[in-house]
Amino acid sequence: MNNSIIIKVAVAAPLFSLFDYLPAETTLATQLLPGCRVRVPFGRGKRIGVIWEICDHDDTTPPAHRLKVIEEILDAIPLLDEKERHFLSWCAGYYHHPIGEVVSAALPTRLRQSKQPSATLEQGWRVTGNNLSLHDFRSAPVQQRILQRLLDAKQGISDKQLTTLDGNIRPALKRLQQKGAIEQCDMAPAPPSCSGKRVTLSQEQQHAVDEIHAASGFSTLLLDGITGSGKTEVYLHAADQVISRGHQVLVLVPEIALTPQLLRRFQRGVAGIVAISHSALGSGDRERSWMQAQKGEVDLLIGTRSAIFTPMPRLGLIIIDEEHDISFKQQEGFRYSARDLAVMKAKQHNIPIVLGSATPSLETLHNSLKDRYQWLKLRQRPGKAKPPQIGLVDIRAQRLRAGICSDLIKSIREEVDKDHQVILFLNRRGYAPQLTCHACGWIAECRDCDARMTWHQKLQRLWCHHCGYQHAKPERCPDCGATDSMIYQGQGTERVEEYLGEVFPDIQVIRIDRDSTRRKGSLEKALHQVNESDACILVGTQMLAKGHDFPRVTLVGILNADQGLLNPDFRAPERTAQLLLQVSGRAGRADKPGKVLIQTRHPRDPLLQTLLHKGYEAFSREELTQRQHAQLPPFAHQALIRAEGIDSKKVQEFLQFSISQAPQLLPHIELWGPTPALIERKAGVYRWHLLL
Ligand code: ADP
Ligand code: ZN
Ligand code: ZN
């Protein structure tokens, strides 16, 4: 091949530039396509990269004899089209992250290596035409069971589904295949299962759908709707219209909101093929969704933050649900905000994007107030459902048991007596956040962090929530040697669960937090249990706050709202208000009226007062005014330089050095620090900050 060509490759390496290579002599020009993966020599080894550009030699490029040759072209068809490459280049520039690492992070795990993309069709099994009767398999019950299932589903069943059957499935499948009873087949993606049944939209909802429909080209719309106002219905209608015009839709949701419940709503609500992508999915399934979307085989992709990097050639609409949620931020490695990237992607594709929330972020509200975003409001719950009544319970001078005051217990009893359900919210898992020696005051602290260990009763272990370090409860106090002197202080969800079990022995208490849902499928099981039971009490962390629709919940109790009120972070009031309203929103979603009780020792706190009496919009306007006075984001930009190391002195010295350099490099910038992080030592590493 002619030697005047240079190939610029985004190589997976922590370096900021593209790297120049030559094509192999045997390579044809038609094989050199931007967006295809290649294997290239790099340093002393080999790396995978993606062809980014193909250019001619000129005086800016190094002479050909100094360039290495591409070893292998891995794809015949580009994985990343031009729009996607343009998007990723922008991401790398905006976040100052090496382009090769950005590209690598955007690809499914297997495709970061030299593996070939797997087929987009799932593998399955079906019965052959051979006339075999179940009776012939009576001595092999596993085979018989499989055959029974396959006879009931002539179009086949996916391999994955079959392997969830009881018994030793793999060898049984092999035997059945050898006997000629079954054969492997490709499974078509699940066909649209839109039931066609639709709610009649309220006037507010219809207006929102019409405005989204009318948006031509790039525009950002804020769908600001109280919890339960029917935002999801608006998404479904808007998505369905876009799909019927032949375009694809990308829906991003927070990590923990992606419940099977929500997936089913989308599957039933739009006349198109729906795929899903999130971190709990196996890497094979994620790659399949990615490839299906990339080939245009699916109409709607619903996923968590990393789904923003799925190329979608027919993209026509992006929807971000709960746009204020912090799980849209990737906080390590290639750090990004999927919400902000989604707005840029919509701009590059020249399509509308909808940001939905009951409690929009202040950045988004600011943009809406400035008319950069179109502000659509849903202020009513459809049908008979009314927004819940929110009240404060002053717990000063009250006797608490497991952190619950007697007024709240009384209210719980009233509701469960009427066969209603109750949610108690406590943002702390485990049994007790502190284990103390009653004799001398010793406190169980983590070996590697400046933090206390949490006692977990079920596990019978002390557990550091910051670094994961665990150990058993000491038999005698490490300080004074006393035995039987350990007491638990404070409460987590386990302790609340235990106490409620004692007070309400006849009522089912269901705990939902990261510990109780660690096993795959256990969250679904718990949610199912809630929907199946009459009266019950749910105890949980913020996992309970979003996305779930519990129609029979009439009372929500918030146990430790004060935790958020006392946090010094400038975003803490915003986060606290969002969390309180999201949790409150779980009450009274169907025809029964809902009530929310917030336990507090600061009933006069201005945040609580504004939220209760004037609502989130008034709160957020006040908060924005305060941010403006203090010149905080979104009225000014901030950057944080974080230094970490095992030697605290060196960490501080580095930041002092940064300060000494700053005036020349950044003349108009204010510097704060260095200050230690909230938890200075974490997992044995010292962390200090410098705020610009
Ligand atoms: P959000 O996403 O704003 O929290 P949802 O879309 O989940 O709200 O709606 C809350 C409940 O109200 C759901 O059970 C939904 O089916 C129902 N709902 C939504 N819109 C309507 C409507 N126009 N008529 C009747 N019920 C509706
Ligand atoms: Zn002691
Ligand atoms: Zn620790």
Image (cartoon, rainbow, N blue to C red):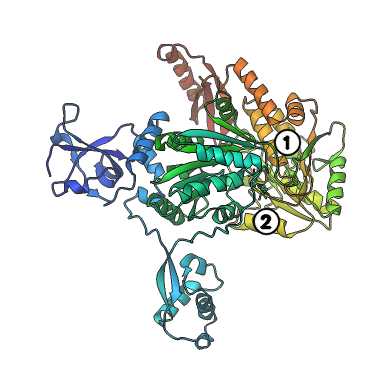
Task: Give how far across and how far down residue 329 sits, in percent.
Answer: 52, 36
Marking on residue 586: none
Q: Amino acid at mark 1?
A: Trp
Q: Relative to residue 562, is residue 216 drawn left or right?
A: left
Q: Relative to residue 348, is residue 327 drawn left or right?
A: right
- Where 134 falls versus 474 (above or below)? below
Circle 1 packing at 10 Å, graded few (<14), some (14-19), many (20+), is some
Please identify the residue farthest to the bottom as the structure is shown.
Answer: 136
Q: Quadrant of residue 455?
A: top right
Residue located 38% across and 36% down the image: 87
Task: Give how far across and how far down residue 296 sits, in percent.
Answer: 39, 51
Label 1 beta carbon within 8 A of ligand 2: yes
In the picture of the structure, the residue carrying the numbered disc 1 is 442
Residue located 72% across and 26% down the image: 607
- The residue closer to the viewer here, 96 or 392, is 392
**Residue 142 in view here:** yes
Q: Earlier in the sequence, mark 1 or mark 2?
A: 1
Looking at the image, is mark 1 or mark 2 nearer the viewer?
Answer: 2
Residue located 81% across and 35% down the image: 391
- Where 230 falls versus 576 (above or below)? below
- The residue closer to the viewer here, 465 or 212, is 212
Q: Amino acid at mark 2?
A: Ala
SS at circle 2: helix
SS at circle 1: loop
**Residue 335 in view here:** no
Marking on residue 526: 2
Circle 2 packing at 10 Å, graded few (<14), some (14-19), many (20+), is some
